[in-house]
Image (tube, rainbow, N blue to C red):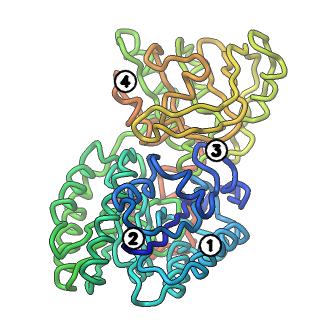
């Protein structure tokens, strides 16, 4: 039996949106569990789709667990100093009081940036390593969008990343991390570590593992693992995080340095060779809507429009109006758009009641500059309390709370409005308001890739739309201050010359 400390801290930081992510955001129950401590970590995270759940299931009841803290703030702007220090302080403090431990497992993201630390996970791991000492193994799991740094590799004995985007393998990732930690407990800490950073950034819409070249890269990483090679992880990176080591990574932990280097070199070569294949056409809103209407005229399934730049999962506000305006302007019929976050509009709809007509200035309240509210008279078609259980393969089985919700209709468009942000990667919020997704002609989804897990199987075709939003797909438009000079800002694109 081993005594194992377990915990987690997630945030995917878009450094180019104005809002900060504070402690209260982590503490609240939204589209993910609230901040939980001690025994509540096991209570909340067991039998869920999160990596920590998979870790606990794989390790089983033969071990003694020291639950620390688990917190997730989704995606958004810089994490405040207060939030990072309070959550990290609790995690490390509980760990210090729970010593001695034989090992530690942390369920992290890998793309957190705070007001003080561009490599927040590296700083967290430095403090954890200081608390447990040099002999205790630390294994972590990371999101596929992690911007891996040398510090993350240095302080760990295993680093296991998601292998899917949409992320449908969170739980399996935890299971893989458990197998790595079990091997390290049995055999001792590995002596080899390797990190390769690619020379180019990859926009999120081109990172999908359901398509090439990411599909083949992930498959090759899996083939390189085994024996003395504990983990071979390909992490595609999160471009809107402003840090020196932003971008895709290959990470290997092995029992000898030669083994680590050989596996990392092989996978890094594969990524470099596939650079020209990371491309995906993006359509302007009016062009996308007209094309969707053309396809939908003879289709038996909905056409999906992905509002990629207003994806809350990448730091978008979820309330930009560009695609909504295009749908109404072009006369789209039997179209549903979601998930549109506007607490004021939801409250106004609840005050008015179902079937009422109400004048609302919808959205445009917290997104990028220049995005205006969409002012119109809407019919309140349905109201909901926002409490439901998700059903899809990416986040299925979660009990979520999106606050008061409303289905607002204008012309031939139904807008699914929530009070709390959630990207449209599950059909449950639509059904919560009486909208059956597969019966629509057009589905406009505020998501970049995650929607594909639950919506692509019912779609006639998917079109990716370049409407305004907080996640800008073209990294040349980001005012980077910390990114390493020389990295190409998109595949085969221009090199970053340094801060302007």
Q: Position of residue 495 (x, y in %)?
A: 40, 68
According to the picture, the residue beneath numbered tag 4 turns out to be: 459
Label 3: few (<14), some or many (≥20) within 10 Å? many
CB within 8 Å, label 2 to label 3: no
Determine whether 191 is above or below 39 in the image: below
Mark 4 or mark 1, which is nearer to you?
1
Q: Quadrant of the N terminus?
A: bottom left
- Mark 4, Cα crowd under 10 Å, few <14 / some 14-19 / many 20+, is many
Asked where in the image residue 11 lies, by quadrant, the reply is bottom right
Q: Secondary structure at mark 4?
A: loop
* Marks 3 and 1, the one that precedes in the sequence: 3
Q: Any mark on residue 389, and which?
A: none
Task: Tell which circle, 1 or 2, labels the residue nearer the N-terminal end.
Answer: 1
Mark in the foreground, 2 or 3: 3
Q: Determine whether, in the image, residue 447 is placed left or right of residue 84.
A: left
Q: Residue at x 68, y 59 (%)?
A: 21
Residue 30 numbered tag:
3
Residue wearing tag 1: 88
Q: Is residue 500 left or right of residue 80?
A: left
Of callouts 3 and 4, which one flags the residue occurring earlier in the amino acid sequence?
A: 3
Quadrant in the picture for residue 451: top left
Q: Residue at x 72, y 28 (%)?
A: 374
Q: Are marks 3 and 4 in contact (CB under 8 Å)?
A: no
Above or below, 486 relative to 390: below
- Give the image location of residue 149, x and y in percent: 43, 76
Residue at point 17%, 84% (across, down): 258
- Gap in Å between the C-alphas at discs 2 and 3? 36 Å
C-alpha distance separating marks 2 and 4: 36 Å
In the rendered image, which residue does mark 2 sit on? Answer: 487
Q: Position of residue 407 (x, y in %)?
A: 66, 20
Judged from the image, the secondary structure of the residue bearing numbered disc 1 is helix
């Amino acid at each position: 039996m081993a005594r194992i400390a377990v915990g987690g801290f997630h945030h995917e930081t878009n450094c180019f949106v104005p809002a900060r992510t504070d402690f209260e955001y982590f503490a609240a129950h939204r589209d993910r569990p609230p901040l939980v401590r001690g025994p509540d970590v096991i209570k909340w995270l067991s039998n869920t789709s999160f990596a920590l759940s998979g870790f606990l299931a794989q390790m089983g009841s033969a071990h003694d667990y020291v639950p620390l803290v688990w917190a997730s703030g989704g995606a958004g702007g810089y994490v405040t100093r207060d939030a990072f220090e309070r959550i990290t302080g609790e995690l490390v403090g509980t760990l210090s009081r729970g010593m001695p431990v034989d090992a530690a497992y942390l369920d992290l993201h890998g793309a957190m940036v705070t007001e003080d630390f561009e490599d927040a996970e590296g700083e967290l791991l430095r403090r954890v390593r200081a608390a447990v000492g040099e002999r205790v193994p630390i294994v972590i799991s990371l999101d596929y969008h992690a911007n891996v740094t040398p510090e993350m590799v240095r302080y760990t004995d295993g680093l296991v990343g998601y292998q899917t985007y949409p992320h449908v393998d969170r739980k399996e990732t935890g299971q893989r991390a458990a197998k790595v930690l079990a091997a390290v407990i049995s055999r001792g800490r590995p002596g080899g570590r390797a990190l390769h950073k690619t020379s180019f950034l990859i926009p999120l819409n081109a990172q999908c593992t359901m398509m090439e070249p990411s599909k083949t890269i992930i498959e090759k990483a899996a083939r390189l693992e085994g024996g003395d090679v504990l983990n071979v992880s390909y992490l595609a990176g999160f471009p809107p995080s402003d840090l020196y080591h932003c971008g895709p990574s290959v990470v290997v932990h092995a029992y000898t340095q030669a083994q680590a280097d050989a596996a990392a070199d092989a996978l890094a070569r594969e990524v470099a060779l596939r650079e020209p294949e990371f491309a995906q056409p993006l359509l302007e809103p009016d062009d996308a809507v007209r094309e969707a209407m053309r396809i939908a005229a003879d289709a038996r399934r909905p056409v999906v429009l992905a509002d990629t730049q207003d994806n809350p999962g990448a730091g978008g506000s979820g309330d930009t109006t560009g695609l909504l305006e295009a749908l109404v302007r072009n006369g789209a019929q039997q179209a549903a758009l979601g998930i549109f976050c506007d607490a004021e509009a939801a409250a106004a709809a609840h005050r008015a009641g179902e079937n009422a007509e109400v004048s609302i200035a919808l959205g445009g309240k917290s997104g990028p500059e220049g995005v205006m509210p969409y002012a119109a008279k809407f019919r309140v078609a349905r109201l909901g309390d926002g409490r439901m259980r998700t059903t899809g393969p990416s986040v299925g089985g979660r009990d979520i709370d999106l606050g008061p919700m409303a289905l607002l209709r204008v012309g031939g468009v139904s807008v699914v409005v929530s009070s709390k942000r959630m990207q449209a990667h599950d059909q449950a919020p639509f059904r919560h308001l009486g909208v059956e997704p597969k019966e629509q002609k057009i589905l406009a989804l505020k998501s970049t890739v995650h929607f594909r897990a639950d919506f692509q199987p019912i779609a006639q075709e998917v079109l990716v739309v370049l409407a305004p939003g907080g996640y800008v797909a073209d990294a040349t438009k980001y005012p980077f201050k910390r990114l390493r000079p020389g990295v190409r800002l998109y595949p085969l694109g221009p090199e970053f010359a340094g801060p302007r």
